[in-house]
Structures are given as C-alpha cells and as structure tokens.
Image (spheres, rainbow, N blue to C red):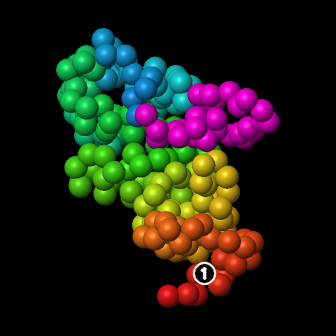
Amino acid sequence: ITMLSLVTGLTEPTKGTVQVNGRLAALLELGSGFHPDLTGSENVYVNAALLGMSKKEAKDRFAQIVEFSGIGDFVDEPLRTYSSGMQVRLAFSIAVHVEPAILVVDEVLAVGDSEFQEKCLKKVTELRKRQTTMLCVSHSPTMVTGFCDRAIWLHHGEIVLDGASGAVMKAYTRYASDPAAGLPQGSISTLEHIAHQE
C-alpha cells in the first residue's frame, strides 16, 4: 500500500521522487473523498473533482456513472443512508468514468456481489483495451496475469523479480507454497527458465 500511496500522492517520499504523467484514478480506499451528509449526486461531483474531472465532464458523464453504479433513486439520498456496498459501487463507478490515463488498482475488484464484480472486470478490461496504463497491486495470480503484461515482485520493499507477468507469478506462487525454499536467486533473465518449468 505504501507504494500506491506514493504514486497517488497520498504520501510524500522520504527520498527520491515519483513522477506521474496524465490523469490518475485510484481504486484503493473507495469512497475516501465522500462526505456522509452529502447526497450521492453531490458526492459524484465532489469526488469527480478530486480525481481531476471538470464540472462539465462530471455533468456529461453523470448519467453513466449512476447507471453503472446501479444505485438508482438512492443517488439523491444522503450518503449516510447507503450500505457500504452501495458506497463502493458509486466510488468505483466514478473512478472508472473519469477516463484516466493511469488506473491504480488493488484488491478492490473483489468487492460487491458477483454481478457487480463481473461488471467491474469488464470495465477494467475495456479501459485496458483503450491503452489505459494500469498499476495493479495484488496477490492474485489470476488478476496479475489477466490484467498485466509486466509484473514486479516486491518483498519487504526490495525487487525480487521483474519481468513477464506469467513468469513472475509462477515464481511467486512457487515461493508462496514453500517459503522455506527461499526467494528466487539469480537475475531477471532467469524468468524465461522459470516460465517453462513445471
């Protein structure tokens, strides 16, 4: 989470720099910019502004955001009356409709019912096809290999492996099933060898 906090600007680095080019939307702590006393509609505009969307853009996409969220008429009710699931739906919908150049995703796609999860996965796949840069943080081999071409395995802040997502996840899964064997040794070039082992 620390790395994601640095990339999204929630935390300042103690040394070095982090440079982000383009509009960034983060699917981390969904709804972190929401206010419980504002209606869903009002929160759409506030949250969209926090994500860098102009008022006109938010107005133009408002109907799409509400439709995708599936909260219907509740959009005009105070957020404090929403269930946590409804808040997540609205927050996710806003984030994916800002048309980000960079989408930062953690395990958040595992929230909601199966129908909403499927809708989320389709939307993320659509963004990926439109060449949206995606930064995913996950322990899920399915998510990493499904959404990422490249994977970086971090262990206590240090890079263990950096390469093709399939090869990195195969090495990670092997380590996760037998940590006593130790972390992979060697250079990044060993990934091709790892990828073809079974």
Instruction: Please indicate whether residue 182 sits to the left or right of residue 64 in the image.
Output: right
Say which element carries label 1: helix
Q: Is residue 145 above or below residue 64?
A: below
Marks counted in the figure total 1
Instruction: Give yes or no for residue 191 being in the magenta stretch.
Output: no
- The picture places residue 45, in percent across and down from the top left corner, at 44, 22
**Residue labelled with disc 1:** 194
State the image quarter where residue 38 is shown: top left
Identified at 74% across, 76% down, the residue is 189
Instruction: Please indicate whether residue 86 sits to the left or right of residue 60 in the image.
Output: left
Q: Can residue 81 be spotted in the picture?
A: yes
Identified at 42% across, 53% down, the residue is 123
Identified at 31% across, 46% down, the residue is 111
State the image quarter where residue 39 is shown: top left
Identified at 77% across, 32% down, the residue is 15
Q: Is residue 111 above or below residue 78?
A: below
Question: What range of the chain is rendered magenta?
Answer: 1-29
Furthest toward the right, the residue is: 16
Q: Can residue 165 be spotted in the picture?
A: no
Q: Main secondary structure of the magenta part?
A: loop
State the image quarter where residue 63 is shown: top left
The kind of residue on which mark 1 rests is: Ile
- The picture places residue 72, in percent across and down from the top left corner, at 22, 33
Q: Is residue 94 above or below residue 120?
A: above
Q: Is residue 121 above or below residue 157?
A: below
Instruction: Please indicate whether residue 63 sits to the left or right of residue 25 in the image.
Output: left
- The picture places residue 91, in percent across and down from the top left corner, at 38, 34
- Using the image as rendered, state which of residue 22 and residue 191 is in the foreground: 191
